[in-house]
Image (spheres, helix red, strand yellow):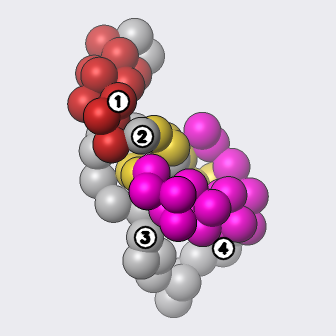
Amino acid sequence: MNGKLWDVAAPAAIVLEAGGLINSPTGGQVFPFDLRNYEGKKVPFVASAPAAQRQLLDEIRNNP
């Protein structure tokens, strides 16, 4: 859930191609990613099936 950009890029391609979703823990979009000021910081993300996204994000928000 909290890797650097290169840790999420390849798995994200697989998840997205399979019809899944990649979002930030707050529900925002992770991709496309703006590389202009990226210095290797962690990129929080959540991978989910579309049907599970809302419940998963609610669980994350309610159980930090």
Report which residue position mark 2 lands on: 49
Can residue 57 be seen at all in this image of the molecule? no
Which numbered marker is on residue 1?
none
Can residue 59 be seen at all in this image of the molecule? yes
Q: Where does residue 31 sit, x and y in percent of width and height?
A: 43, 70
Residue range corresponding to the magenta coloring: 1-20
User: N-terminal of the two: label 2 or label 4?
Assistant: 4
Figure quadrant of the N terminus: top right
Q: Circle 1 — which element?
A: helix
Q: Nearer the viewer, mark 2 or mark 4?
A: 2
Q: CA distance from mark 2 to mark 4?
A: 30 Å
Q: Nearer the viewer, mark 2 or mark 3?
A: 2
Q: Answer above or below: position of 25 versus 20.
A: above
Dot 3 amino acid type: Phe
User: N-terminal of the two: label 1 or label 4?
Assistant: 4
Q: Main secondary structure of the magenta part?
A: helix
Please tell me which residue is depicted at 25% across the width and 31% down the height of the picture.
54
Which numbered marker is on residue 31?
3
Figure quadrant of the C terminus: top left
Q: Circle 4 — which element?
A: loop
Which numbered marker is on residue 52?
1
Which numbered marker is on residue 39?
4
